[in-house]
Amino acid sequence: MSVEKTLLEHFSKIDFPIPDKGLTLLAISAEGQVLAQMGEEKKSNELQSLGALLAGVWQASEALKDFMSDEQEKDDLKLNFQNAHSGYLLLPPSEKNPKIIFAFIFENQTNPGKIKHIAGKIRDHFNSIEILKKENGEKEEFLFKNITEDEVDKLFSFAGI
Amino acid sequence: MSFVNHNKKEVNCKIVYYGPGLGGKTTNIQYVYKKTSGDNKGNMIKLNTENERTLFFDFLPLELGEIRGYKTRFHLYTVPGQVFYEASRKLILRAVDGLIFVADSQLEKMEANIESLDGLEKNLTEQGYDISKIPLVFQWNKRDLPNVTPCEDLEKRLNKWGSPSYEAAAINGDGVFETLKEVSKLVLMNLKGGL
Ligand SMILES: Nc1nc2c(ncn2[C@@H]2O[C@H](COP(=O)(O)OP(=O)(O)OP(=O)(O)O)[C@@H](O)[C@H]2O)c(=O)[nH]1
Ligand SMILES: [Mg+2]
């Protein structure tokens, strides 16, 4: 099963419905690829940018952590950027899923406390299961063997060049 | 790290423009952005200072159509070239699939090029990459200027691995797509995640 399908299945198991307006939940790889989205749908090009920026913010924050001396305080850090109704919240990768960041992007929420509640549920759920298992041996083959100049040219002509 | 989604038949690859400050990295992807049309055009993100120097990174997602049934998407990043942004450069290099080293051809920039390339080599090693194995293309930029180092000298001083190299004047778009196409090809050839 694809990572996306697995994630979506797990999202739907959370016993707190994710509304389809005002909240988008993203699972983002540590490298900035959006793996799955739920809630209010973002367009494909928005997803690319959100993935890059949120992973960038997260990576910078992780790097800043190295300047903190209290080891215990480093656990369970969240990243919050919000006013009374809108903003985003980032959950750190868990031990089981060290490569996945969960992001909650919300707007016009009368009760943003609710987002924290959902986030807590997501965190607990994904603390106990492992999503990105390496599929046995499948990954080591080259995907495009003997790619030709022609094929690459075609890729670039499609982009209007 | 390239990301292959077999269900959706998509591949995503990360390409990083690296090189000394003011060498023309942002100018490169700005030109790509300008020349990309319609559906292929993603949003370009620039995280820069007031005077247009890159502060964290530039980002441009590029949809390139299909190859052997797979929708191909490249994520282009530039690093900030100024020396004191080393920590940010390390972050941007994570999970990189291919590199374009944009060298500033101006005579007086040779030392800056060397210093930047040394940094690249070191940062890659730290992250477990081998610079001689990763898809890497050199771009000798600013060839439109009068006071430039001959390309043979740039090759000798910088291109220790015999990587492909292109002359460019990114400001006019010359060489920009040649460089990008070359690294794209190398990245796609290298792509693992077999069927
Ligand atoms: N003459 C000439 N100028 C160029 C060329 N490419 C870039 N420039 C100019 O060089 C300056 C710096 O270009 P940038 O693209 O911002 O450089 P950068 O490598 O992104 O710099 P940092 O963000 O500080 O790392 C700008 O004024 C560009 O217009 C070129 O091919 N020829
Ligand atoms: Mg720049």
Image (cartoon, rainbow, N blue to C red):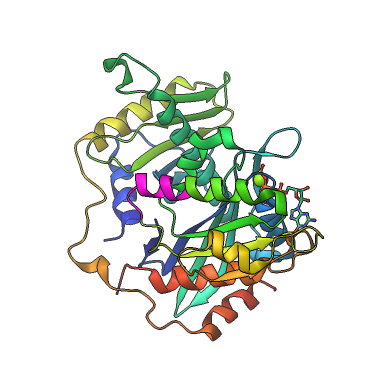
Residue at 67% of width from left, 49% of height from top? B109
> Nearest the camera: A1 or A57?
A57
Q: Give x and y (percent) for residue A48.
A: 54, 51
Q: Is residue A92 visible?
A: yes
Q: Is residue A42 visible?
A: no
Q: Quadrant of the N terminus of chain B?
A: bottom left
Q: Give x and y (percent) for residue B108.
A: 71, 49
Splitting the image into 4 quarters, where does residue A85 fall? Answer: top right
Q: Give x and y (percent) for residue A118.
A: 37, 29
Q: Is residue A39 above or below residue B178?
A: above
> Nearest the camera: A57 or B27?
B27
Q: What is the count of numbered marks?
A: 0
Q: Give x and y (percent) for residue B117.
A: 52, 51
* B121 drawn magenta: yes
Q: Is residue A138 left or right of residue B8?
A: left
Q: Is residue B104 above or below residue B6?
A: above
Q: Which residues are magenta?
A: B120-129
